[in-house]
Amino acid sequence: MEFNNIEEIAKFIVADGKGILAADESNPTCGKRFDSIGVDSTEENRRDYREMLFRAKGMKENIGGVILFDETIRQEAVDGTLLRDVISNQGALPGIKVDKGLQPIEDCPGETVTVGLDGLDERLKEYSKMGAKFTKWRAVINIGEDIPSDKCIDANMQALADYAYCAQQNGMVPIVEPEVLMDGDHIIDDCYKATDRSLRSLFTHLQKGGVNIKGTLLKPNMVTSGKNCANQAGIEEVAKKTLECLISNVPNELPGVTFLSGGQSDILATAHLDLMNKIGGFSWKLSFSYGRALQAPALKAWRGKPENIFISQDELSHRAKMNKLASLGQWQEELEDV
Ligand code: 13P
């Protein structure tokens, strides 16, 4: 696959309803996922699991890009093929998570800023040589008493803009991910406000920082109730409020919005995406960049056993297909039963 510029790369990733498989869990996070199925998080097990996912039939046609962790972009499959080449052979582009995680912010209890700008340019140059075509940086915004603060939002969105500029200078598409967490018992309107403030700040910083919006992808949370909120908003309210929030903040020239799933169940993440695409009224592609909502059924089916590989791959292929349909507004709940 040859591209003339980053705008073409961004368009390719979200073309025809395709989305992104987020497989960039850090080793500790991967450990937590593997704990849930009783598998040790060794380098070899992580390789086997990801090789299995990347070789699933449903990658073709449904997945335009895969986000990798540093370990995975360097790893080889059992037969010696680089895992990043396994992905390319499926017609998808390899991408890489480049932030270095969260650090507490002074005088802002409960809040963090994402770090990793030190040495970023050198890291990006190496990843680009390896064939990475896009990158990801995740900022985390917490909802709680008196938070998020302006200081937290501003520091995180400034870092996202600095990162995005650097990625583009190195010929790669930046995915900018400002994640307002679902943790907490807040009502959906609190999520709306925090998401609205974050997105407004993000696009102000991107524009000020000279980032080419046409060569950028946005990976936001949906506007939902907090995980422990007693009064959970329904699918229609989530879809409408998310769209309203995006439409008032996201420039028309952005090629794609690819949601994170953030702890939503796999079916709900698909249902919300589908309804938003059925409602319409926006110019960007509205697609997915799910981690848990794409992988959960495959992980559960696998349980670290080679004899479960095919059924596990079928689970991933099914979720990838369902989410592609949702990105086209063509999903129906009955399709889940087959
Ligand atoms: P989830 O879809 O599991 O939230 O993961 C997406 C991701 O990449 C988080 O950074």
Image (cartoon, grey):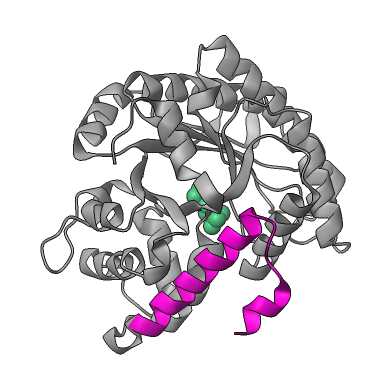
Residue 215 appearing in the image: yes
- Identify the residue at image location x=66%, y=61%: 269
Give the magenta range: 310-338
Which residue is nearer to you in this view: 188 or 237? 237
Q: Is residue 258 magenta?
A: no
Please determine whether, in this image, residue 98 is positioned above or below residue 205. below
The answer to whether residue 136 is left or right of residue 243 is: left
Query: Where residue 111 appears, x then y in whole percent?
Result: 62, 36
Magenta stretch, main secondary structure class = helix
Residue 16 on image: x %, y %? 53, 50
Total numbered badges shown on the rendered structure: 0
Corner quadrant of residue 245: top right
Q: Which of the two residues, 79 or 220, is positioned nearer the viewer here?
A: 79
Residue at image location 31% in from the left, 23% down from the top: 170
Q: Nearer the viewer, residue 111 or 281?
A: 281
Q: Position of residue 273 (x, y in %)?
A: 68, 55
Image position, residue 125 (x, y; %): 24, 27
Seen in the image, is 166 located left or right of residue 132?
Answer: right
Side of 310 relative to 203 (left or right): left
